[in-house]
């Protein structure tokens, strides 16, 4: 493998890792906002967080689906 190919592969790996971290943060924020709304409706914090996670759905499936849209695996 020549140096240009190595740099290209390293850049792709770095980009994929960054996109994965960004997606994980986005998911965390969505769940947090949903939990806050539930708390505002009178639900206890732990119950609100649990319900928000359930309402959001399976993180792995969502991450895999998003990864497919990006054109690679995250």
Image (cartoon, rainbow, N blue to C red):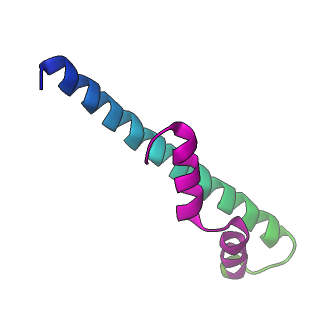
Residue nearest the viewer, comparing 66 with 32: 66
User: Furthest residue to the right?
Assistant: 41
| Dominant secondary structure, magenta | helix
Does 38 sit left or right of 18 as displayed? right
Does 25 sit left or right of 49 as displayed? left
- Point out the stretch of residues depicted in magenta: 47-74
Residue 40 coordinates in the image, percent (x, y):
84, 68
> Residue 29 lies in magenta, yes or no?
no
Determine the image quadrant of residue 2.
top left
State whether residue 39 is above or below residue 21. Answer: below
Residue 60 coordinates in the image, percent (x, y):
52, 63
Q: Quadrant of the N terminus?
A: top left
Determine the image quadrant of residue 16.
top left
Image point (52%, 55%), residue name: 64
User: Furthest residue to the top?
Assistant: 4
Residue 67 coordinates in the image, percent (x, y):
51, 46
Determine the image quadrant of residue 11.
top left
Residue nearest the viewer, comparing 73 with 56: 73
Image point (50%, 38%), residue name: 71
Does 40 sit left or right of 13 as displayed? right
Image point (38%, 43%), residue name: 17
Residue 5 coordinates in the image, percent (x, y):
21, 23
Total marks placed? 0
> Residue 62 lies in magenta, yes or no?
yes
Image point (68%, 56%), residue name: 30
Does 56 sit left or right of 62 as displayed? right
């Amino acid at each position: 493998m020549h140096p240009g190919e190595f740099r290209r592969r390293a850049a792709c790996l770095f980009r994929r890792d960054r996109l994965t971290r960004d997606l994980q943060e986005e998911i965390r924020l969505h769940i947090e906002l949903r939990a806050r709304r539930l708390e505002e409706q009178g639900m206890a914090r732990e119950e609100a967080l649990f319900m928000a996670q359930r309402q959001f759905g399976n993180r792995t499936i969502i991450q895999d689906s998003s990864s497919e849209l990006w054109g690679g695996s995250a």
